[in-house]
Amino acid sequence: MRPSDRSRVLLVQALSLILLPTASIIAGNDRSEELRRIPRQYSVAELGVAGGRSRSYVMNARCLNDSGQVVGWANDGEPYDFLDDTAVFWDPRRGARVLQSLPGAVASLALALNNQGQAVGISGEPFPLSHPVVWRHASSDPVALPLPEGALGGMATGINAHGLVIGAIITSEGLASPLAWRNGQPALLPLNPANPNSEGWCFAVNDRGTVVGHIDGIPTAWINGSPVTLGSFGGAFGYASSINNRGLIAGSAETPDGNPHAYMWANGVMVRLGGDEPYSSALSLNNRGEIVGAAGLANLEGRAVLWTGTERVWLGDRIPSDSGWTLLEADCINDRGQITGIGYHDGQPRVFLLTPRSGLDRDACDDRIENP
């Protein structure tokens, strides 16, 4: 059975959030108030590709942990040509390496990472027929996660410090359904019982096991397994993209004009971030309460942005002016303040890694990182 028109719209929106670079949350210490008093400047480095591929292959960074390790995938620059995608694990000391695929797989993508270096994603056929997998470490074979009976395929989208994996499947009716793998076994997360065609997606999980995503386009958190609606700006679609260990949530929601706007949710209240830009998107949140994403200007050009408290920082203004970089989107931030995202380097699409050059992390971060 083919999914309904609304189902296809929700599926495309969810895949855009996952397969175009977005982020998961990584755990760490809370020093948000101390950090907000410190101005930031960054060094910028390009993340290379793995396996001897040429620079024409683009590294897509999906998640960054507190050790500076990054997972994602490399492809030939065609955003929806999943037949050539290769899962990649990038380490600041060892560079990039290709993650192993399931036997016979035509595509693999690494989508999330925890501080233990465990990664999750997909391998096999392109989504929605893909299989969710876990890589226990960078050199291990992937472990296929079991699917509920009747599922066409699925993907793993997040993993916390305790190894709890979350993701989504496509049912035999063509509907997206969120789930969690507890002790390796799949358990579907509840949806809207009043809607027989209800569907949803989850994008991130914190160390307490709270999962965030959306149900039928409404930003949602599953707290102790029960769905909680986070709020709305009056538009048709919204989602929660990240949650930290303090229970703060970040995401984006549409206004009635159809434009998405970034928000932070805390203590039951959804607060819009940013100024008067036509659109904004919050993609990652760390345990300090820093949020990164993108915001559109009057000409709809996106720019990478950091929100910390009430302050909005254009990240492109915090790197050397002669770096050759244009930062379009910040996709993930760790608790050291390092940020990955996408942009143009000397006119070519590339993935960047920003490292703070002042304040708390000056002694903890290298100013110069060699590409493999």
Image: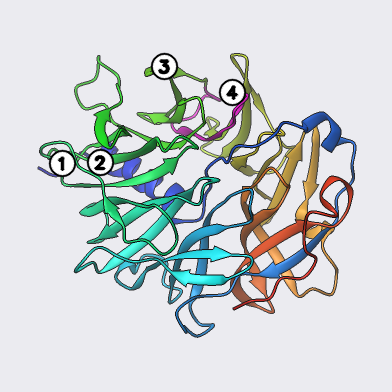
Q: Nearer the viewer, residue 183 or 282?
A: 183
Inter-mark Cα distance, 1 to 4: 31 Å
Inter-mark Cα distance, 4 to 2: 26 Å
Q: Amino acid at mark 3?
A: Asn
Residue 50 vs 217, above or below: the answer is below
Q: Which residue is located at x 72 percent, y 37 percent?
A: 274
Q: Secondary structure at mark 3?
A: loop
Relative image position of residue 368 (x, y in whole percent): 77, 70
Inter-mark Cα distance, 1 to 3: 24 Å
Relative image position of residue 206 (x, y in whole percent): 51, 31
Residue 236 belongs to the span the image colors magenta: yes
Q: Amino acid at mark 1?
A: Ala
The answer to whether 27 appears left or right of 88 in the picture is: right
Residue 169: which disc?
A: 2
Q: Nearer the viewer, residue 322 or 136?
A: 136
Q: Secondary structure at mark 2?
A: strand
Q: Earlier in the sequence, mark 1 or mark 4?
A: 1
Residue 224: which disc?
A: 3
Query: Mark 3 or 2, which is nearer the eye?
Result: 3
Q: Which residues are magenta?
A: 232-249
Q: Which residue is mark 4?
A: 247
For the question of whether residue 297 can be seen, the reply is no
The answer to whether marks 1 and 2 mark residues whose Cβ atoms lie closer than 8 Å is yes
Residue 322 vs 129, above or below: the answer is below
The answer to whether 31 appears left or right of 121 in the picture is: right
Image quadrant for the N terminus?
Answer: top left
Q: Secondary structure at mark 1?
A: loop
Q: Which residue is mark 1?
A: 151
